[in-house]
Amino acid sequence: MIEILSPGLLATIQDLGRSGLGSLGVGRSGAMDSLALDVANAMLGNDATAAAIEITLGGFECRIMEPVDICLAGADCKATLDGKPLPRWWVQTLQQGQILKMGFSTSGMRSILAFRGGLDVPCVLGSRSTDLKGGFGGLEGRALIRGDRLTALAKSDPAHSLAFGLGPKHWPTLFDIPASPLPLRFIPAAEWGNYDSDNQALFISSSWTISKDSNRIGYRLEGSEIKPKQHLELLSHGILPGTIQLPASGKPVIQLADANTAGGYPKLGVVIADDLPLLAQARLGSSVRFVACTLEQAKEVRQHRLKMIEAIRKNATSHLQASP
């Protein structure tokens, strides 16, 4: 068990989210950086669906009430354990009475604090993720607050203390500093052909700034205004995280983890699922650009990610074998 001493700006319980309920108006939710969650769960030997804490911009602090195995992944928040540095992409057994503290992120936006076995909160509609808009899932459907207590589904073995992690030499993609502007691969949408070549070129050639008015629902982009020669109106239709909409302002909006389930804005495309974790770590005020890709290329990216997660899980197995 842990006790929250400070949740920071925003800390919620998230897993990989709810799938297949969009037709009922239930959004996906889930971790913004699903790759960091996948890596953390693989390193702990958890099921891929195990829930963790997603922390935005650091500032999180908790007290350990009983021994627990954790993995810290995602943004670099200069974490410390009883004042001593605790690196990211690292598994550690925490002992009763210790204090885990995160500074404010020096790079990236979101950190994942995962626990062996995952967090013990109710599974609602197939997921333990917090849906902040609907007010359900996670812990009472809300962000974590000071005084909350959380329990992991697996106990730490007092006779086998864990301390291992991943390094940049063998896992460079987890430590690389993203290019600026951040390239985001996208698959053109059904309405892509309704934009003339000038507008298509403007969208792809421009550098877009992530607006301060952005959140888990979506990132608003600032930059060149896209003005279609013919105004396009659509009936509301289903949308998913990654959808790039073009509202009347001419400034694109990318739907993210807490995306609406339907919308009527025309679409430019959809950011491929495996680039959304990169976007989740992009700081507000930083810039992105778009690179068109095909469905086949997106599938290749997914296969590369799956192979990496499997390799990480295999790498962690020897460290975990002596622990239940």
Image (cartoon, rainbow, N blue to C red):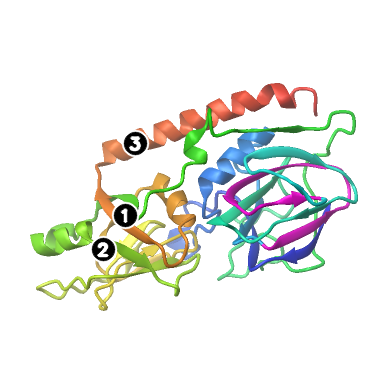
User: Residue at 50% across / 57% down in the picture?
Assistant: 28
Q: Position of residue 111 (x, y in %)?
A: 61, 53
Residue under the point 70% across and 56% down: 102
Part of the protein shown in magenta: 59-81
Hey, which quadrant is residue 132 in on the image?
bottom right
- State the residue position of label 2: 267
In screen coordinates, is 15 left or right of 266? right
Residue at 90% across, 51% down: 97
- The picture quadrant where one finds residue 89 is top right
Residue 196 visible in the current orientation: no
**Residue 130: where, in percent of width, then height?**
62, 61
* Residue 70 visible to the viewer: yes
Where is mark 1, residue-wise?
Answer: 270
Q: Which residue is mark 3?
A: 299
Q: CA distance from mark 3 to mark 2?
A: 21 Å
Element type where label 1 sits in the image: strand
In contact (CB < 8 Å): disc 1 and disc 3: no
Tag 3: Cα neighbours inside 10 Å, few (<14), some, or many (≥20)? some
Three-letter code, disc 3 = Lys
State the image coordinates of residue 174 (x, y, percent, origin top left).
51, 40
The crowd level at tag 2 (other Cα within 10 Å; few <14, some 14-19, many 20+) is many
Amino acid type, label 1: Val
Q: Is residue 179 above or below residue 248?
A: above
Residue at the spot x=63%, y=61% of the render? Answer: 104
